[in-house]
Image (tube, rainbow, N blue to C red):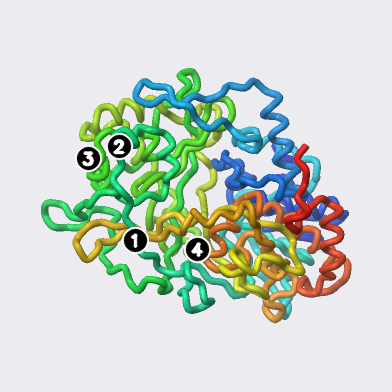
């Protein structure tokens, strides 16, 4: 039992700083507030803290740990120390009875159960109130100041400064702060990569290439075969939109696909069989079947992405045009009611379990692939309180604030430096698929990805403090380090958990500075803020990269 999920007072609870979202960004913000000597309450809308770091992203999305500083670096170093101190079982990928050399876990790749252990420790050390399973219902304001929030179940929480560190931005939205979701047009901000994307077509891999695990890294590959989108009655197969592509570069309100990031293994003593979903619809996988039939010899490590983590386990992610990503299954999710979101979450779980069940059990799937799928299963030592299933769906993007400064493509690719930098980003531009359509020639195509070849590791970009602040006329005491003010293009690289933790740390320090100065968050002394962050080993500029211990 965490120290916190504790105080369920009859009347309102209050603190200097109220954080909505026990995500890694929210927990870093809380730790920063505590270290600054202020009081804090963290409210987590789900029943588990740690978001995607404890919920399935076991391969830490940063190729540049030297650019991650402050509390984020402390956290991942602490997890790494635990991992390296324990027994080391180096995974070997088995495919069709053969062993393949495979990427060893990197230093910050982790087991979710260890990630949770460290976050639990942080909360206990912080000795602050943590309320779990509570969603924001409404927000009270006086002028442009939030005074409190009412949670589902009736509890009221009051504070002086608020931080929305949730993946969905519900506090921000209910506070009347401008926000958006979906894809801007290229014209809106002059972005070449914005809006609806032109579907592309990759080559048809040879059988030998498909048996090579490294092909699994090409997880944004197209169909590489012309597949019919219709059944024998002429109806579109499940998962294909009956709509035209639209104007390339045009705006829409679609978002990149979500999935649950699974922890899988081939270790016999650890492996649990793929579970059959509560609601199984084999017709959902007819297009998948056509894809498999068009690629004889395709392996399991081609239809999913397998990334090695410690102790013979793998982070299982989406790969290719039909995988565990539920393309278009999140339509309308950002602004949906809580009840509607819960239905979507169950639907995503059913879809993803059904995908794996289909591969492992449907007689129409080639025997070799079925046997290979059955050589894998869920790791029985992860998510043990949730039937081995991750506790957080991967919300790759949701609402985005439209605040004091909107980060766009140019901030990522060309105008990289900022006078008010509060952290760095360096991950590739990465949007997963958005939707499947029928092209003019009558074949299935899929669109929505961004060009992963734009590698930012050697030339990172700085994230301005202004991207975390709403317009002052809308709210003067709210910071938003996760649903930051950015376009769809920009969020596709910002959206990594170490970056969210960096921004959460900076937001926590800024919140206490605003509290003590009595000034709006937009008027925090930037020179004083950046000086304090540097003292706390936050990396604000490329030339200040830290030396890993």
Q: Nearer the viewer, residue 487 or 412?
A: 412
Judge depth for marks 4 and 3 and give the one in front: 3
Q: Which mark is residue 334?
A: 4
Q: Could you tell whether 536 is left or right of 373 in the image? A: right
Circles 4 and 3: CB distance less than 8 Å? no
SS at mark 4 in the image: helix
Comes first in the chain, label 4 or label 1:
1
In 3D space, how far apart are the residues under numbered discs 4 and 1 (Cα atoms)?
25 Å
Residue 326 percent location from the top left of the image: 39, 51
Q: Nearer the viewer, residue 420 or 32?
A: 420
SS at mark 2 in the image: helix
Comes first in the chain, label 4 or label 3:
3
- How many C-alpha atoms fall within 10 Å of the one at disc 2: few (<14), some, or many (≥20)? many
Residue 37 percent location from the top left of the image: 88, 54
Q: Could you tell whether 33 is left or right of 356 in the image? A: right
Q: How many marks?
A: 4
Identify the residue under disc 2: 358
Comes first in the chain, label 2 or label 4:
4
Identify the residue under disc 1: 199
- Dividing the picture into quarters, in which one does residue 433 lie? bottom left
Pick the quarter of the image with the N terminus: top right
Q: Could you tell whether 371 is left or right of 134 in the image? A: left
Residue 399 percent location from the top left of the image: 54, 65
Comes first in the chain, label 1 or label 2:
1
Identify the residue under disc 3: 293
Residue 434 percent location from the top left of the image: 40, 59
Judge depth for marks 1 and 3 and give the one in front: 1
Pick the quarter of the image with the C terminus: top right
Circles 1 and 3: CB distance less than 8 Å? no
Q: Is residue 536 above or below residue 313?
A: below
Identify the residue at horizontal 51%, vertical 50% (top origin): 394
In 3D space, how far apart are the residues under numbered discs 1 and 3 (Cα atoms)?
22 Å
């Amino acid at each position: 039992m965490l120290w916190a999920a504790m105080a369920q007072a009859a009347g309102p609870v209050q603190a200097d700083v109220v954080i909505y979202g026990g995500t890694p960004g929210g927990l870093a913000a809380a730790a920063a507030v505590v270290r600054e000597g202020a009081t804090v309450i963290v409210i987590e809308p789900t029943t588990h803290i740690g978001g995607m770091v404890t919920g399935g992203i076991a391969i830490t999305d940063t190729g540049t740990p030297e650019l991650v500083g402050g509390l984020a670096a402390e956290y991942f170093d602490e997890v790494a120390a635990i991992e390296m101190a324990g027994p080391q079982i180096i995974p070997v990928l088995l495919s069709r009875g053969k062993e393949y050399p495979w990427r060893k876990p990197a230093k910050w790749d982790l087991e979710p159960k260890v990630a949770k252990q460290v976050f639990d420790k942080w909360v206990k050390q912080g000795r602050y109130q943590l309320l779990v399973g509570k969603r924001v219902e409404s927000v009270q304001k006086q002028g442009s100041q939030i005074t409190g929030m009412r949670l589902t179940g009736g509890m009221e929480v009051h504070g002086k400064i608020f931080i929305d560190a949730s993946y969905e931005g519900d506090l921000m939205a209910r506070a009347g702060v401008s926000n958006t979701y979906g894809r801007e047009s290229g014209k809106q901000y002059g972005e070449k990569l914005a809006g609806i994307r032109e579907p592309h077509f990759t080559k048809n891999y040879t059988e030998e290439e498909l048996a090579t695990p490294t092909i699994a890294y090409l997880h944004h590959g197209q169909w590489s075969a012309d597949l019919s989108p219709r059944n024998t009655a002429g109806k579109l197969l499940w998962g294909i939109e009956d709509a035209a592509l639209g104007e390339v570069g045009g705006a829409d309100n679609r978002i990149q696909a979500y999935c649950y990031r699974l922890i899988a293994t081939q270790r016999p003593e650890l492996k649990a069989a793929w579970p059959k979903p509560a609601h199984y619809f084999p017709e959902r996988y007819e297009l998948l079947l056509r894809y498999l039939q068009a690629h004889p010899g395709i392996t399991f490590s081609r239809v999913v992405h397998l990334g090695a983590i410690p102790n013979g386990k793998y982070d299982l992610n989406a790969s290719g045009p039909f995988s565990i990503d539920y393309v278009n299954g999140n339509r309308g999710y950002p602004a949906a009611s809580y009840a509607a979101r819960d239905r979507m979450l169950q639907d995503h779980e059913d879809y993803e379990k059904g995908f794996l069940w289909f591969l492992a059990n449907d007689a129409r799937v080639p025997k070799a692939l079925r046997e290979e799928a059955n050589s894998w299963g869920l790791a029985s030592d992860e998510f043990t309180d949730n039937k081995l299933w991750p506790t957080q769906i991967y919300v790759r993007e949701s609402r985005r604030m439209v605040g004091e400064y909107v980060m766009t493509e140019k901030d990522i690719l060309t105008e990289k430096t900022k006078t008010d930098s509060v952290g760095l980003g360096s991950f590739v531009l990465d949007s997963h698929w958005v939707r499947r359509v029928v092209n003019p020639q009558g074949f299935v195509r899929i669109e929505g990805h961004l060009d992963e070849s734009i590698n930012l590791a050697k030339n990172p970009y700085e994230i301005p403090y202004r991207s975390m602040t709403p317009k002052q006329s809308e709210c003067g005491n709210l910071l938003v380090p996760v649903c930051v003010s950015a376009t769809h293009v920009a969020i596709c690289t910002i959206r990594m958990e170490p970056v969210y933790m960096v921004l959460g740390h900076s937001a926590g320090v800024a919140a206490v500075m605003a509290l003590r100065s009595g000034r709006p968050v937009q008027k925090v002394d930037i020179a004083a803020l950046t000086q304090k962050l540097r003292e706390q080993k936050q990396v604000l500029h490329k030339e200040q990269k830290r030396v890993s211990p």
